[in-house]
Image: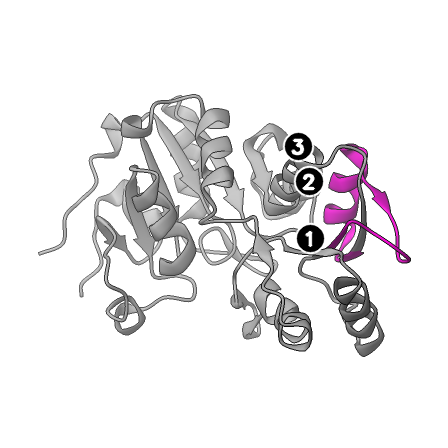
Amino acid sequence: MQRILDIEKKNGFICDMDGVIYHGNRILPGVAEFVEWLKNNDKNFLFLTNSSERSPIELHQKLQRMGLDVDPSHFYTSALATADFLAHQRPGCSAYVIGEPGLINALYAKGISMNDVNPDYVVVGETRNYNYDSIIRAVRLVNAGAKLIGTNPDMTGPSEQGIIPACRALVAPIELSTGVVAYYLGKPNPLMMKTGIKLLGVKPEEAVIVGDRMDTDIIAGIESEIETVLVLSGVTDGNVMKQFPYRPMYIYNGVGDIIKKKCADL
């Protein structure tokens, strides 16, 4: 018998997006009701996403097109986490970036300049402009001493067309060619979780994390000592879950079932 989360007792909700809120441009069942419940019950909530492609404003607009009105302040992305980390580690540094505008703009906002000659860092995020030339340049720069950074460790992600390669799959050729292992900033990196909990504005024991990945969302919650909710609407099913040595505290088919208090039948 699966446990049921007593959501009324939780004051803060950290939610993943891809596979939890939507697949591509398609909102998932029960999401609108879940977000409405969070607002109506004055719950603190933060969308903590490993995706680095979009800025908070763009994520706000994307949800708006799906019929959800969520202020940009409710989003924290792996692009923002990466920019915060680099700005703290080496203020005024430069980077060669393989990624989308959400990542590039986050870096610019922290005073990090673009450099494809002798950068301090090579930064890789999700992108639709990935090509062999960019891999070759990244390999050459890493071999010359640039530090390799990945915005998140996700190997794959859900989409409307099914499972697609994610950040770590794009970093892998650079790692294999150079022998250098990238440092990844997204979940389950404790730096991102620490910032997320701080932005949420509640104590860890008052919070819960909702996600679709065992290797990022759930382990991030466990290691941050907050309660964990796995939803089966993304990349994880019952068989995948059993491959891991740890388990989520609660399991639902989707976020809509959290407010219905209807756990998954596994």
Q: Residue at x 60, y 44 (%)?
A: 63
Figure disc tally? 3
Residue 254 rendering spot, x and y as whole percentages: 35, 54
Q: Which residue is mark 2?
A: 86
Q: Residue at x 87, y 54 (%)?
A: 118
Image position of 157 with respect to 116: above or below = below
Circles 2 and 3, Cβ within 8 Å, touching? The answer is yes
Quadrant (top left/top right/bottom left/bottom right) for the N terminus: bottom left
Image position of 163 with respect to 65: above or below = below
Q: Residue at x 62, y 53 (%)?
A: 151
What's drawn in magenta, residue-wise? 97-122
Choose between 212 and 155: the one closer to the eye: 155
Q: Residue at x 39, y 34 (%)?
A: 13
Q: Which residue is mark 1?
A: 53
What's the CA distance linking mark 3 and mark 1?
A: 22 Å
Q: Is residue 105 magenta?
A: yes
Q: Secondary structure at mark 3?
A: helix
Q: Which residue is mark 3?
A: 88
Image position of 95 with respect to 156: above or below = above
Amino acid at dot 1: Glu
Quadrant (top left/top right/bottom left/bottom right) for the C terminus: bottom left
